[in-house]
Every structure is written in C-alpha cells, then in structure tokens.
Amino acid sequence: MPNVTVSPTRMELTRLKGKLRTAQRGHKLLKDKRDELMKQFLDTVREVRALRAEVETDLMAVHGSFTVASALMSARSIQQALMYPKQSVELTMGTQNIMSVNVPVYHFETLTKSDADLYPYGFADTSGELDDAVNALGKVFRKMLKLAQIEKAAQLMAEEIEKTRRRVNALEYVMIPNTQDAIRYITMKLDENDRATTTRLMKVKDMILKEAIDERRAKNAEVMAKTGDSGNFSV
C-alpha cells in the first residue's frame, strides 16, 4: 500500500512508471558521482596531510631562524629592518570544476622579479640568520597558499558528498520504494477492476442468453397454442 494517495488509473500508472525510470537513472548517476567525489576527496585529503606536515616543518625552521636572529639582533633592529617591505605580491583567484564542485584556485605572483626585493633592508646592519629567516618565510608562504587552496577544495567536496549522499538515500529509501508501492497498488486495483468487469460481462451474457431462451420458448408455446399441436420443440 503506498504512503500517498494515488488514483488507480492507467494514465497514473504510465506516469508513475516514467517517474520510476527517471528516478532509477538519477539514482545511478548520483551514486557514480558520489563514488568519484569520494575518490577525489580521499586523494585531496592525503595531499593535505602531506603538505600540512611539510608546511609545519618549514614554519618550525622559520621560527628557529627568527629566534636565532633575535638572539643576535635587538628586537628594535629587527622591527626597523622589516617595517617597510620592498616586495609586493598579487593574488588572484580562479575556479576549477571537479564533479560539478567549483573549487578555488589561487594564483600568486610577485610584482617584481628580482630576488633582492625580498629583503627590505640593507645587509650591513643585519645578520645572516635574518636573511635566512626572511628567505624561508617567502618560500613557505607559497606552500601555505597551496595548502589553503586544497583544504578549501576538500571542504567543498565534503559538503557536496554529503548533499549527494542525502539525495541518493532519499531516492533509494523513500522515492523509489514509494513509487514502486504505488505502481503495485495501481496494478492490483486495475487487475481487480478487470476481473470484476469480466465477471459482470459473463453475467450479462448469461442473462441475455436466458432471455433469448425464454423468448424462444414463449414463441414456441404461442405457436403450439395456435395450431393445437402438442409436439415437442427443441430449443
């Protein structure tokens, strides 16, 4: 028995069968999408873990370099050396479509190509450890940007996987079973109606045949009464 009220008509049966075919095709496509998204998501998660470990190691190295530079230079000197940066960067964002998920793609580009512009200070009053720290920080910044990009991609894919999973479950456990129940219900009702119609037709046929026999007998009796013949007439 379906969960919703349906009209047991052939037109409704045809409509429900078309709806069921569409739902089954959509269910297969959504399952394929979910499986492919899950595969790409797991690959992205592995990439995130590896890159995050690498970034954390590099940041520890940068922190160590700044710690050594702080031991060799005063905090005031370091602050003055890094106060006015010479290098500037331009960050643009595009999108990449992964299984209907638009993930961000960051493009990082320095406005000047000279590596010397990375250091906003002269080398006479600073230590080499500060140079190493600034250089390492510039390199790890690109990795941090890449990490942010793939982490956001993983987040968006996880959200899309969850939405796709809910749709697959809704089709698999609610819509398709309800539609199949409705089709079985209508088919059963139509079969009952066909059997009832056949029974009525057989009864009508029997009534018509009985009326014809009675009419023939009445005519025979009338003929016998007129002729006075007592012979037997077959019917």
Image (cartoon, grey):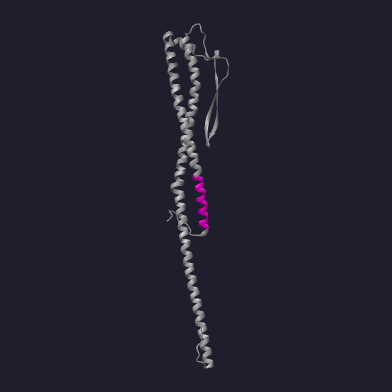
Q: Is the magenta stretch mostly helix, strand or loop?
A: helix
Front-lying residue, 19 or 127: 19
Is residue 8 magenta-colored?
A: no
Is residue 21 magenta-colored?
A: yes
Residue extending farthest to the top is: 124
Above or below residue 218? Residue 129 is above
Q: Can residue 156 be seen in this view?
A: no
Residue extending farthest to the bottom is: 228
Rendered image quadrant of residue 185: bottom left
Report the span colored magenta. 11-27
Residue occupying the point 50% across, 44% down: 28
Q: Is residue 115 visible?
A: yes
x then y, percent, for residue 46 = 45, 29
Above or below residue 119? Residue 34 is below
Residue occupying the point 50% across, 74% down: 205
x then y, percent, for residue 130 = 47, 11
Q: How many labels does the image show?
A: 0
Above or below residue 185? Residue 207 is below
x then y, percent, for residue 234 = 51, 84
Above or below residue 101? Residue 109 is above
x then y, percent, for residue 110 = 56, 19
Quadrant of the image containing the N terminus: bottom left
Front-lying residue, 233 or 32: 233
Residue occupying the point 50% across, 77% down: 209
Front-lying residue, 101 or 93: 101
